Image: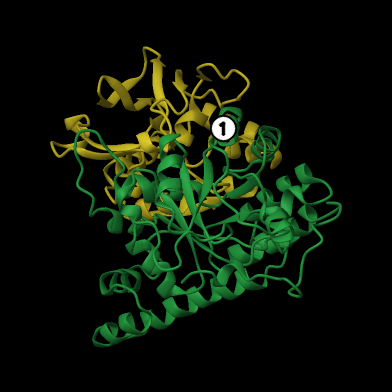
Amino acid sequence: MDTLAAHAASATADDHLTGTLAAKVGHAQMLKGGVIMDVMNPEQARIAQEAGACAVMALERIPADIRQQGGVARMSDPKMIKEIKAAVTIPVMAKCRIGHTVEAQILEAIDIDYIDESEVLTPADDVHHVNKNKFKVPFVNGCRNLGEALRRIAEGAAMIRTKGEAGTGNVVEAVRHAKAVQSEIRRLQSMDEDELYVYAKDIQAPLSLVKKTKELGRLPVVNFAAGGVATPADAALMMQLGMDGVFVGSGIFKSGNPKKRAEAIVKAVTHYNDPKMLAEISEDLGEAMVGINSGEGYIMFCNRDS
Amino acid sequence: MAEIVIGVLALQGDFAEHIATLKKCGDVKCREVRKLQDLEGTHGLVIPGGESTVILKLLRDFKLFEHVKAYGSSGIPMFGTCAGCIMLSSSIDGMPEQETLRLGDYSVKRNAYGAQVHSFESHIKGDPAIFGEEPLRAILIRAPMITKCGPNFKILAEHEGHPVLVQQDNILSCTFHPEITGDARIHKYFVELVKQKQMAYKS
């Protein structure tokens, strides 16, 4: 929608102005209809690029391993991120801990293309998020509902994703979060302008962004699915729920045949509305990641912040 | 005159933004193109912004590459922005392994301005005969640069001495993203190009 630019139009242009909201939001618009894949080394990054990833997320431990190994999960080694950057031509993202402004500064200093302020890492601040408006590099944040999405956008997030439940191979939380946002937007669109003041208060979001969302009929930035996507059908499901694209974390490199599965998920995001194509795409992919259901020692990453 | 149908390649990227902008250009119908049958009956094709490696791979995987190449070679208008501009080029500097459609006689350098933190916006002046005096708001996102351009290309806009909007007959290439600014002037120009070609076919 060129309507996203209407939101971004608040940036004032100059002859050569970097780090504007339009440049940040616009970058996410170029990722639409694409798949962003978690990778742990240059070799995996190359496989992801060849399979059709529109970006990669560089991290030392994928969420499934963080879940299993426990301990404090932090930003990855900048050296490792730089090696991945050197291995591919597509954009490279990396994660910083929630509220860890310095990890974000370090990632910006090594020219990372996008920062994911992620609940998958152990939060550094249990109250505040990073003030992302102060950065030239764009940020993506997770959300479970509309209020959370708009709070992150107010802090400067240029892209939103569902939180889902990373590292589980279980798509149920991603579906819950996507549907929550979409149904809240539909409700918002049916409201009278007079009702917006209380609604903004109720969902704890800035009134200006509530109004903007009502006007656009969608979030004012790109919204991807994330957290538990493991199969082409999962990816297509999230697209049918109105997501702009898909993050796949552990689902690829924890599966039996990463290259084949990665290619299939990319194709499924393009043909998400074509069951016949999806049937073809889903054939013979080998074993999906095992998947984890909630149980002993299971931490809900998605409830770590709000 | 029969209805004009413009296809927008919808494999990956900001095709929805192109469709929204084309809808501001008067009486045109837009169609998302994912398969060969979607391409049939269109009078022009847009290749959107996105990741050129992804668009190339999916053109190959879905067996569209040769058809899209033949489509452009036959003289039907095509408009590419950013990744689309890379796809229409004849070659990519330093990356001979990445194939292009070779429909435009120009070469590009990918990510010529650097990583995302160097993405920028600028007000640039387009050809006044087409775009008037009001500058175009250009947003360059990990943008390519047109490094060499054949003699038959018209440069319709420049930024800091580099062409950013060029045209050779039916091929219109743009290194920035008019589709995300809400300014439809370049899209209107493309729609005019499509209409002119249709008139020429009929006469």
Whether residue A142 is visible? yes
x and y percentages locating residue A259 in the rendered image: 76, 42
Q: Identify the residue shown where x is 49% and y is 69%.
A: A305
Hey, which residue is sitting farthest left in the picture? B133
Q: Colour of chain B?
A: yellow
Q: Residue furthest front?
A: A71
Q: Is residue A283 left or right of residue B39?
A: right
Taking the image as shown, residue A271 lies to the left or right of residue A205, namely right
Percent of width and height locating residue A288: 81, 57
Q: In the picture shown, does residue A168 fall above or below A254?
A: below
**Taking A152 as reference, is B181 above or below it?**
above
Q: Along the line of sight, which residue is nearer the eye, A93 or A90?
A: A93
* Residue B112 falls in image quadrant: top left
User: At 40% across and 14% down in the image, what residue appears?
Assistant: B150
Specify the chain shown as green: A
Q: Quadrant of the C terminus of chain B?
A: top left
Towards the viewer: A160 or B48: A160
Task: Identify the amino acid type marked 1.
Answer: Lys
> Counting other residues with Cα less than 10 Å from the Cα at mark 1, is it few (<14), some (14-19), or many (20 or more)?
few
Residue at the image position 20 percent from the left and 33 percent from the top: A15
Residue A207 or residue A112, whichever sits in front: A112
The residue that mark 1 highlights is A79
